[in-house]
Image: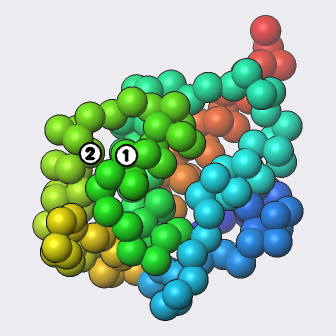
C-alpha cells in the first residue's frame, strides 16, 4: 500500500516508539523474552496528540475494532491470555467487555491463522502466528481510521 509523504510523516509523529523510546515490535511480534507495555504505547500516542486527560474511548469504537486491538495487544506482549487481554481493554480503553465478547473474537482470529493458541494448565495463551497477516490487518484498520480522522479534522475548519 503506497502512502503519501504527509501520511508517512503523521504516522511517524504518532509512532509511540519515537517519543517514548520504545522499539517498535517486529511484524512477527516481540522477540522471545521481550515485552512492550501497551499502556506506555497508548500514553505516548495520547501525549503526542495532546489529548485531554478527560478523553475516553467510545465502547462501540473499541468493539468495532476489537480484532485489530486484540492482535496489537498480543503482538506487544510475549504471549498473553484472555483474562489479561480483558484487563488491558478495561484499563487502556475503559471498555468493559465480557468474556463472551472477547473469547469468540480470539477464536475467530485464531481460525484465520493470525494467532496461535497454546493450552496451559489453567488458561490458554495467545501469540501472533502470522506476523505478515497481523501487520496487514492492523495497517488496513489504521489507514481507515487515519483517513476518517483527517476528513473529520479538515471539516472542523468549515464549522
- For the residues bearing labels 1 and 2, Cβ distance under 8 angstroms: yes
> Residue 96, relative to residue 86: is it above or below?
above
> Residue 44, relative to residue 22: is it above or below?
above
96 displayed left or right of 16: left
The answer, for residue 3, to whether it is visible in the render is yes
> Residue 51, relative to residue 33: is it above or below?
above
**For discs 1 and 2, the disc positioned in front in the rendered view:** 1
The answer, for residue 154, to whether it is visible in the render is no
> Residue 101, relative to residue 76: is it above or below?
above
Between 5 and 57, the residue placed more toward the observer is 57
Q: Residue furthest bottom?
A: 32
Q: Residue at x 64, y 53 (%)?
A: 39
| Element on which disc 1 rests | helix
Q: Tell me which corner region of the image, top left, top right, bottom left or bottom right, holds residue 124.
A: bottom left
Cα distance between the residues tagged 1 and 2: 7 Å
Q: Residue at x 44, y 32 (%)?
A: 95
The quarter of the image holding the C terminus is: top right
Residue 132: percent from the left, percent from the top? 40, 80
Q: Tell me which corner region of the image, top left, top right, bottom left or bottom right, holds residue 148.
A: top right
Q: Residue at x 61, y 26 (%)?
A: 56
Q: Residue at x 39, y 74 (%)?
A: 79
Residue 158: percent from the left, percent from the top? 79, 14
Q: Residue furthest top?
A: 159
Q: Tell me which corner region of the image, top left, top right, bottom left or bottom right, holds residue 99.
A: top left
Q: Residue furthest front?
A: 121
Q: Which mark is residue 102?
A: 2
Q: Badge 2 local density, few (<14 within 10 Å), some, or many (20+)? A: some
81 displayed left or right of 118: right
Q: Which mark is residue 100?
A: none
34 displayed left or right of 113: right
Q: Which residue is mark 1?
A: 86
Residue 60: percent from the left, percent from the top? 40, 26
Amino acid at each position: 500500500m503506497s502512502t503519501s509523504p504527509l501520511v508517512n510523516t503523521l504516522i511517524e509523529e504518532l509512532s509511540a516508539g519515537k517519543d517514548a523510546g520504545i522499539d517498535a515490535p517486529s511484524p512477527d511480534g516481540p522477540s522471545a523474552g521481550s515485552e512492550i507495555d501497551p499502556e506506555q504505547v497508548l500514553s505516548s500516542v495520547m501525549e503526542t496528540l495532546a489529548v485531554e486527560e478527560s478523553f475516553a474511548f467510545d465502547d462501540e469504537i473499541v468493539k468495532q475494532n476489537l480484532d485489530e486491538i486484540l492482535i496489537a495487544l498480543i503482538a506487544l506482549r510475549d504471549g498473553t491470555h484472555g483474562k489479561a487481554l480483558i484487563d488491558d481493554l478495561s484499563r487502556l480503553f475503559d471498555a468493559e467487555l465480557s468474556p463472551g465478547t472477547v473469547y469468540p473474537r480470539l477464536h475467530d482470529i485464531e481460525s484465520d491463522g493470525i494467532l496461535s493458541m497454546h493450552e496451559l494448565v489453567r488458561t490458554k495463551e495467545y501469540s501472533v502466528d502470522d506476523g505478515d497477516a497481523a501487520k496487514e490487518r492492523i495497517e488496513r484498520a489504521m489507514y481507515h481510521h487515519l483517513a476518517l480522522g483527517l476528513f473529520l479534522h479538515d471539516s472542523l475548519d468549515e464549522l
